[in-house]
Image: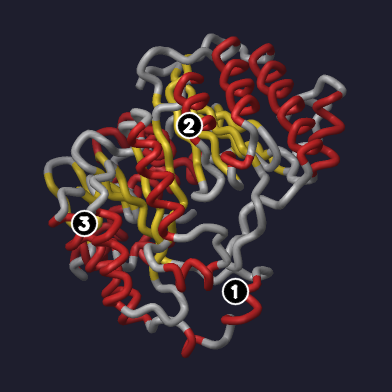
Amino acid sequence: MTPNDLELYIHIPFCVRKCAYCDFLSFPSSDGDKALYVDRLTEEIRCRWEREKEPVRTATVFIGGGTPSVLPAASIRTILETVRETYGLPEGTEVSVEVNPGTVTEEKLRVWKDAGINRISFGCQSMDDEELKLLGRIHTVRDFLENYQMARKLGFEEINVDLMSALPGQSLDAWERTLRKAASLQTEHISAYSLIIEEGTPFGEKYTGRPELLPDEETDRAMYERTAEILGDCGFAQYEISNYAKPGHACRHNVGYWTGVPYQGFGLGASSYRENTRYKNTDVMREYLGFVSEGGSAGSSEFPEREKEILTEADLRAEFMILGLRLTNGVSSREFEERFGAGLDEVYGSVIRKYRSLGFLETEGDRVRLNRKGLSVSNTIMAEFLP
């Protein structure tokens, strides 16, 4: 990365229907609203580009959601053409799109590839049809496999598969079967997350306060351990708490988030991180469509920002540690001192010594990282780095 590198995130809030566990900013919508949104989104990209104070270089592009693949192929092409005309798409830029099985066609894949997309992230979640029904997914395992093979046939060489563990009623054996089936596809990347019951979702209403309906803590932890073991045996290296990749295939966009690369978000509710400041676009569609159409952009005085937070030095130090410790190679004490002008031991020595003595942290050279034991309880440890 160079000092002027900038990651771009583009949010597409639409989906076919909300899944039972989902609390993301997403919702079904009409074709007309989707077209209007794409118009406003491309307008925002141009407005932001015109307001850039210094030259920047696109490091990565990630089109997420929601379900970006519900848009017509031409809409994705228009979005990327706008990026290319403004921020640029240097050769070799990682350009990812999130996809839900059942919303993919050969035409879409061909147009995406021609437009510059070179990485697909499939929201598979499970390789068991009954579990998919429970989650409220719109696809079957067969749908996923057909879409996956179609993408391979058309030449996509970077594919991620999202999987979800600790589902209601899920056994350790069932999770292992899903892992092995996904790994057998020879995909380059697997993201494996544990289900979180979120307030305000159908799962929240059904399972909050009823732990007996979910895998217990011991089973959840066993699933996490088996994930690393099974995927490791299949050639995947764990490089982050929930992410596993074949050598050389880690997601550059996400690694950028965890290592502090600035990013610019476009679209409804999208977040940005620039010059030690966080911005967040409004998550009210009427406001987003209305204000952008008047020539404003998120971050300008004309756009109703929902959040703007200038990070303190203490915030930045904590974020360096919390995000960096998500990665299995941890954080560098040298980089910490170069960035903050203070030694890592001077600022966080007591926390590091505490968890090293408990067997959760280890050091090698100038790097501090969570070990296997520490990764499984990472949230507890990371909370101690907060200001």
The foreground one among 105 and 290 is: 105
Separation of residues labelled 3 and 2 (CA atoms) = 28 Å
Seen in the picture, residue 359 relative to 286 is either above or below; the reply is: below
Residue at image x 65%, y 59%? 18
Q: Tag count in the figure? A: 3
Residue at image x 47%, y 26%? 110
Circle 1: element type: helix
> Colour scheme used in the picture?
secondary structure
Which amino acid type is shown beneath numbered disc 1? Phe
Give the image quarter of residue 74.
top right
Which label belongs to residue 109?
Answer: 2
Task: Give the percent coordinates (x, y) of residue 161.
Answer: 37, 49
Q: Which residue is mark 1?
A: 203
The foreground one among 232 and 123 is: 123
Mark 3, mark 2: which one is toward the viewer? 2
For residue 141, side relative to residue 287 (left or right):
left
Q: Earlier in the sequence, mark 3 or mark 1?
A: 1
Which amino acid type is shown beneath numbered disc 2? Leu
Label 1: how many residues lie within 10 Å, few (<14), some (14-19) or many (20+)? some
For residue 15, side relative to residue 99 (left or right):
right
Task: Give the percent coordinates (x, y) of residue 126.
Answer: 40, 63
Label 2: how many residues lie within 10 Å, few (<14), some (14-19) or many (20+)? many
Specify the quadrant that holds the N terminus. top left
Q: Which residue is mark 3?
A: 231
Q: Earlier in the sequence, mark 3 or mark 2?
A: 2
Residue at image x 34%, y 28%? 155
Which amino acid type is shown beneath numbered disc 3? Leu
Give the image quarter of residue 121.
top left
Q: Could you tell me if the residues under marks 3 and 1 are in contact, i.e. CB atoms within 8 Å?
A: no
Give the image quarter of residue 119.
top left
